[in-house]
């Protein structure tokens, strides 16, 4: 019944991203047999946890989960503690430690705050896979000020081919922005009313309040080959790929969030008077006809 | 989860449908529930709630225009059989003085009947309707407006506007809803503007905005004022909606400047991408970095 999973995924592509967690929970309750398929395919906002050993924050998702516990990339410990939780092989763990340090630098350079985590695991065919997670939350500095959150989930697979390595990357960015102030600001009306001046005398006792929410996620995939000098090259290779992808996707998000959604609104209602524009066009046509004659 | 809980969960999904996508959501839910009989009867209340809240438009039987199906359009049920939900689903279009039955699943109208309007409120309602239609043509590319009087009141009128754009081929849809309750007795207008936009090409991005307002009605506006008073009411609406749209531009600018940039920079402070060999070098320890530096200097 791949069919059923397709329907669930289609549903998640349509329902408001802001409610993704409760909607996924609902679907899991409705179809418990498909819980793993669903949880493995639908990205949800990353949870911020605190490593008990180091006090450092890390991110929790399906990839560092074992049962009800999550593994910290800093101490390699599970929380709540697990006796026999899955951990990477010593060789891969060594790479994981270096990767966490490198992406911590990346996070500081681009996010100037937030939390990052990298988790690696061995694949059956001899290669390995990993996930690079980045999250930043902006709280409203005062009531009415905007707030937001950014979650990056980069899942990659690495296959070594001699002195080369092939990488497959799937990146999802979840972005949410909320502004409560919209329309409530009481600046003077700059739009002179075309139909009598009724607008102006009502300014004294007008009350307005509102909220604007932009939320969602976008996913992109890419594949690339890089030379492989040493094990640590995996980190610079995926680092370059992820950096490139985030730059590309940030532009894309900007276009969709601030361009597309706004265009649709202004396509629904026009600020300019359409009747007036229509009359003007007709007048122009008449004039052109008149000149030609 | 028992059947009732499953229907309940399915209903919640339906109520969250983006503009123009209720059938897609319904198809997904059908597949997930896979019990058409219990689904169809079970989700009818959710479909009704969705349609009424979303100002779904209906083709008025025997007329060339559409009207809004909403709570304000509901014809009070005369039927003594309260359980017969179908008989309650009658709505009216004041513009054509027609009531009709509305099917919340197929969105089809049937069984038209003439409705005689309330003689006291009708003249000003018609004046508001004419002004509203003119306003609609001025600012909406493809909108529908309905103006309702309030049963038992000659001073309270509801103006509802809806505009939809569905573009599934390019993976987006949008809906503008606005509503104004004009009370010439209390000299007040209360209103709200609701926006929903869905963009879903390789992703799922949604804009959702709510805006509510309360304005004093200038004393000159009274039902006795006829067409001139009605035009003034719509001038108020025009000013409010223009102002809201302009403020939305400001909100976009603010979100872009403060929130978006504050979450993630376009480039690091250095204005160049990371030097990953260096990043690893620093992290692998000072010794290695020093020896590398020694090499390149040599």
Image (cartoon, coloured by chain):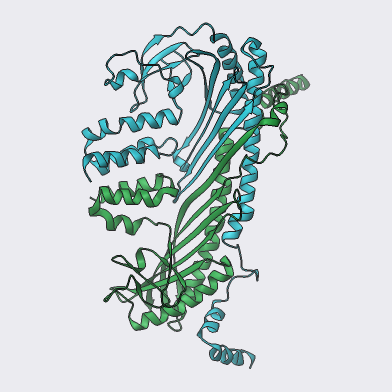
Chain colours: A green, B cyan
Exactly how many numbered labels are in the figure? 0
Residue at the image point whose x is 36% and y is 28% from the top? B48
Q: Nearer the viewer, residue B273 or B10?
A: B10
Task: Give residue B296's quadrant in the image.
Answer: bottom right
- Percent position (x, y) of residue B197? 50, 40
Residue B62 is left or right of residue A31, and the answer is: right
Task: Give residue A64's quadrant in the image.
Answer: bottom left
Residue at the image point whose x is 56% and y is 80% from the top? B278
Quadrant for the C terminus of chain B, please: bottom right
Task: Give residue B269's quadrant in the image.
Answer: bottom right
Residue B15 is left or right of residue A256, and the answer is: left
- Percent position (x, y) of residue A53? 41, 77
Q: Nearer the viewer, residue B33 or B73?
A: B73
Please tell me whether residue A20 is drawn above or below residue B136 in the rendered image.
below
Q: Nearer the viewer, residue B249 or A289?
A: B249
- Percent position (x, y) of residue B55? 46, 28
């Amino acid at each position: 019944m791949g069919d059923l999973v397709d329907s669930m995924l289609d549903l998640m592509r349509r329902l408001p991203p802001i409610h993704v967690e409760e909607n996924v929970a609902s679907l899991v309750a409705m179809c418990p047999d498909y819980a793993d398929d669903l949880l493995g395919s639908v990205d949800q906002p990353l949870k911020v946890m605190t490593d008990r050993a180091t006090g450092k924050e890390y991110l929790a998702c399906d990839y560092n989960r074992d049962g009800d516990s999550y593994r910290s990339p800093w101490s390699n410990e599970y929380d709540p503690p697990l006796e026999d939780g899955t951990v990477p092989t010593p060789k891969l763990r060594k790479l994981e430690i270096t990767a966490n340090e490198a992406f911590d630098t990346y996070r500081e350079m681009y996010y100037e705050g937030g939390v990052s985590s990298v988790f690696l695991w061995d694949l059956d065919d001899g290669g390995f896979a990993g996930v690079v997670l980045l999250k930043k939350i902006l709280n409203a500095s005062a009531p009415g000020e905007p707030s937001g959150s950014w979650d990056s989930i980069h899942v990659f697979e690495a296959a070594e081919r001699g002195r080369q390595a092939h990488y497959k990357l799937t990146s999802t960015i979840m972005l949410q922005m909320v502004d409560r102030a919209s329309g409530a600001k009481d600046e003077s009306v700059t739009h002179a009313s075309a139909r009598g001046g009724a607008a102006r005398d009502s300014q004294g006792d007008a009350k307005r309040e509102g909220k604007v929410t932009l939320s969602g996620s976008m996913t992109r995939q890419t594949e690339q080959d890089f030379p492989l000098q040493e094990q640590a090259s995996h980190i610079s290779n995926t680092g370059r790929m992820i950096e490139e992808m985030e730059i590309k996707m940030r532009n894309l998000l900007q276009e969709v969030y601030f361009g597309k959604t706004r265009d649709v609104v202004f396509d629904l209602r026009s600020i300019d008077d359409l009747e007036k524009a229509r009359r003007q066009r007709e007048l122009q046509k008449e004039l052109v006809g008149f000149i030609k004659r | 989860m028992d059947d009732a809980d499953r229907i309940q969960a399915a209903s919640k999904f339906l109520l969250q449908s983006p503009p123009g996508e209720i059938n897609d959501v319904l198809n997904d839910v059908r597949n997930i529930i896979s019990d058409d009989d219990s689904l169809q009867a079970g989700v009818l209340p959710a479909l009704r709630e969705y349609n009424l809240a979303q100002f779904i438009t209906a083709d008025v039987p025997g007329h060339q225009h559409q009207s809004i199906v909403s709570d304000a359009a509901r014809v009070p049920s005369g039927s003594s059989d309260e359980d017969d939900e179908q008989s309650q689903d009658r709505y009216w279009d004041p513009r054509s003085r027609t009531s009709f039955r509305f099917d919340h699943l197929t969105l089809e109208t049937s069984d038209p009947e003439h409705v005689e309007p309330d003689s006291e409120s009708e003249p000003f309602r018609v004046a508001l309707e004419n002004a509203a239609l003119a306003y609609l043509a001025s600012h909406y590319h493809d909108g529908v407006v309905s103006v309702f009087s309030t049963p038992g009141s000659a001073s309270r009128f509801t103006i509802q506007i809806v505009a939809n754009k569905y573009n599934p081929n390019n993976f987006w849809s949008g809906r503008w809803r606005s509503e104004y309750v004009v009370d010439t007795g209390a000299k007040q207008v209360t209103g709200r503007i609701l926006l929903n936009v869905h963009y879903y090409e390789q992703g799922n991005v949604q804009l959702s905005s709510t805006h509510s307002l309360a304005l004093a009605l200038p004393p000159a506006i009274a039902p006795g004022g006829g067409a001139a008073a009605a035009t003034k009411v719509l001038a108020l609406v025009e000013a409010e909606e223009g102002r809201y749209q302009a403020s939305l531009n400001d909100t976009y600018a603010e979100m872009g400047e403060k929130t978006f940039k504050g979450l993630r920079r376009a480039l690091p402070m250095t204005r160049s991408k990371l030097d990953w060999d260096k990043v690893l070098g620093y992290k692998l320890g000072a010794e290695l970095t020093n020896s590398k530096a020694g090499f390149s200097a040599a």
